[in-house]
Image (tube, helix red, strand yellow):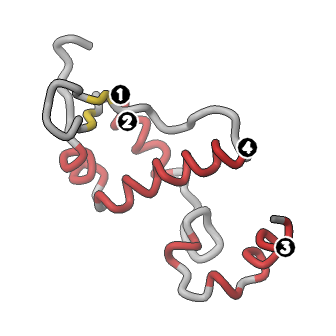
Amino acid sequence: MVNEKMYSATDVCAELNISRFTLTHWYDLQSNLLRDGMITEKYLPEPVRLTNERGKPRRWTQEMVDALRKYQENIVVGRNGIYGMYTNPNHLSTRKYQKHVDKA
């Protein structure tokens, strides 16, 4: 891992053809699911944080990018998918969301 090429968030997003907003939301969703106890272990690769650089940027290796690509291929798309709350403008009125709110 010492001599491996490291990719920035911009490079990862360009390779996966996604926005940085999407990449951030993937990690935010994982964090929320862990916090709520819906999952017990992380399913996305943990990026390396460069603590010696300003802002502590995240970096990914090629293996991590491949894991993100595999995750991207398995995402259920559409309004009922895992990211439906972000893509469906009527999400707050759907039965699925109402059941989730009633449980809480």
| Foreground tag (3 vs 1) | 3
Residue sitting at x 31%, y 28%: 48
Q: Amino acid at mark 4?
A: Gly
Separation of residues labelled 3 and 1 (CA atoms): 40 Å
Q: In x, y percent, where is residue 88?
A: 55, 81
Relative to residue 50, is residue 48 drawn left or right?
right
In the rendered view, would you say 8 is above or below 104?
above
Q: Secondary structure at mark 4?
A: loop
User: Dot 1 corresponds to which residue?
Assistant: 63
Mark found first going from the N terminus, 3 or 4: 4
Q: Amino acid at mark 3?
A: Asp
Separation of residues labelled 3 and 4 (CA atoms): 17 Å
User: Dot 3 corresponds to which residue?
Assistant: 102
Residue sitting at x 81%, y 65%: 104
Q: Secondary structure at mark 1?
A: helix
Residue sitting at x 23%, y 35%: 56
Q: Amino acid at mark 2?
A: Asp
Q: Residue furthest right?
A: 103
Count neighbours of disc 2 (C-alpha within 10 A) and say few if under 14, some if 14 to 19, many if 20 or more: some
Q: Label 2 near label 3: C-beta < 8 Å? A: no
In the rendered view, would you say 86 is above or below 25?
below
Q: Report the disc number at residue 37.
A: 4
Mark found first going from the N terminus, 3 or 1: 1
User: Dot 2 corresponds to which residue?
Assistant: 66
Count neighbours of disc 4 (C-alpha within 10 A) and say few if under 14, some if 14 to 19, many if 20 or more: few
Mark found first going from the N terminus, 3 or 2: 2
Relative to residue 96, is residue 34 drawn left or right?
left
Separation of residues labelled 4 and 2 (CA atoms): 27 Å
In the rendered view, would you say 103 is above or below 23?
below
Q: Label 4 near label 1: C-beta < 8 Å? A: no
